[in-house]
Amino acid sequence: MKAKPFYALLFFIILIICYRIFGYTGHFGFDDMQYAEIAANLLDGKVDFEDHFTFRFTIIAATALSYKLFGINDFASSLPAMTLTILTLVIVYAVMRKQGFLPTIFGLAFTTTSQWLLFYSNKLMPDIYLVFFTILATYIYFHYRYESQKHVVGHAIAFSVTLLFGFMSKGTVVLLLPWLLYLFFIDFFLKKETKFWKWVIVSGTICLIFYFASIKYLTGEFFYRFKAIAQNSYLNKCSYDQQPMGILLKRLFFDFFDMTINYGMSVPLVFVVTAFISKGWRQMLQINNATSFFLVSASYYSCHQTS
């Protein structure tokens, strides 16, 4: 009997659940406890916009809803991240299943066994939210460009809203900007999907206007989120603007390779680099097919994760 790709998805979903049951270590640190407090206070009608974590609306809203349904406990704290992790696996499955059982196994295995994804799969932190919304945006673009070619407005709006949700999870989603600009310029250079990107710009602008107007309504200032970030900032190892240039250069170059190995990113990266070499990097960079699109995206995301 021919093995079905769905069984691979089911296996890795069970793995995520088992990891929560047998490997859960509680709260990670100060940040997740602060998210929990903000979400619990929200249920009591208390909102503190002086705390910049309050502006991570997706995390706070999902956690508050989980607390409302299941009470304030570890299970409710873990549930949103676990749900998004499973949905991320579903997206990977949706892409890979047409390739057969073994490719689906490899795709789901590389995703699930990524050290940080597995660790954060049950943590009340923004990391899984960023992963999910990034993967979802990638899938929306892929589905329109390489599979559907229909409903351009709907795909563009979904793409913009997904990125907005990522931004509402954590501001570091802006690190996707080089990837977005690359796709944008490649499509315009090849004169493909220009209508899609025009609608992305229109819908994205509307999303941002609505977002900042909402902050204005809630706080009295359009850019109060950035003001709160500045007020809550403190010196830490990631404050590269306040540290010697040598620290920044070390982080950009030497530390990148060290973290690639230590965080388990070197194995999939070897596959990506090998595919680039075998298929020709110039042709791959044109992303004129689904394979080249995912290889370019995987290369960027691998660097993004360790940066």
Image (cartoon, rainbow, N blue to C red):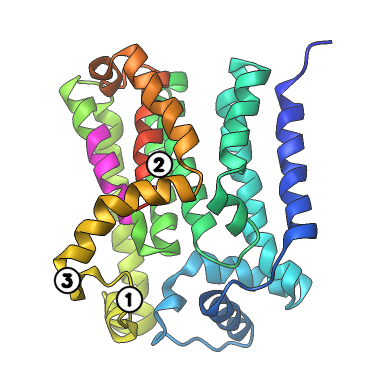
Q: Residues within 10 Å of mark 3 (few under 14, many from 20)?
A: few
Q: Which residues are magenta?
A: 174-183
Q: In this image, 137 relative to 199: left or right?
A: right
Residue 142 lies, with reference to residue 82, above or below; the image says: above
* Residue where numbered disc 1 is placed: 225
| Residue at image coords 75%, 20% | 4
| Residue at image coords 28%, 25% | 193
Image quarter (top left, top right, bottom left or bottom right) of the N terminus: top right
Q: Would you say residue 211 is visible in this rendering?
A: yes
Residue 22 at what x, y percent from top left? 79, 58
Q: Reply yes or no: does residue 94 show up in magenta.
A: no
Residue 194 lies, with reference to residue 260, above or below; the image says: above
Residue 109 at what x, y percent from top left? 62, 35
The quadrant in which residue 188 appears is top left
| Residue at image coords 62%, 70% | 63
Residue type (three-letter) at the residue carrying disc 2: Ser
* Residue where numbered disc 2 is placed: 302
Residue 248 at what x, y percent from top left? 22, 62
| Residue at image coords 73%, 72% | 74
Task: Identify the secondary structure beneath mark 1.
Answer: helix
Q: Reply yes or no: does residue 180 show up in magenta.
A: yes
Residue at mark 2 to residue at mark 1: CA–CA distance: 29 Å
Answer with mark 1 or mark 3, whichever residue precedes in sequence.
1
The outermost residue toward the right is 1
The outermost residue toward the top is 1
* Residue where numbered disc 3 is placed: 244
Closer to the camera in the image, 11 or 264:
264
Residue type (three-letter) at the residue carrying disc 3: Pro
Task: Identify the secondary structure beneath mark 3.
Answer: loop
Can you tell which of label 2 and label 1 is closer to the viewer? Answer: 2
Q: Main secondary structure of the magenta part?
A: helix
Residue type (three-letter) at the residue carrying disc 1: Arg
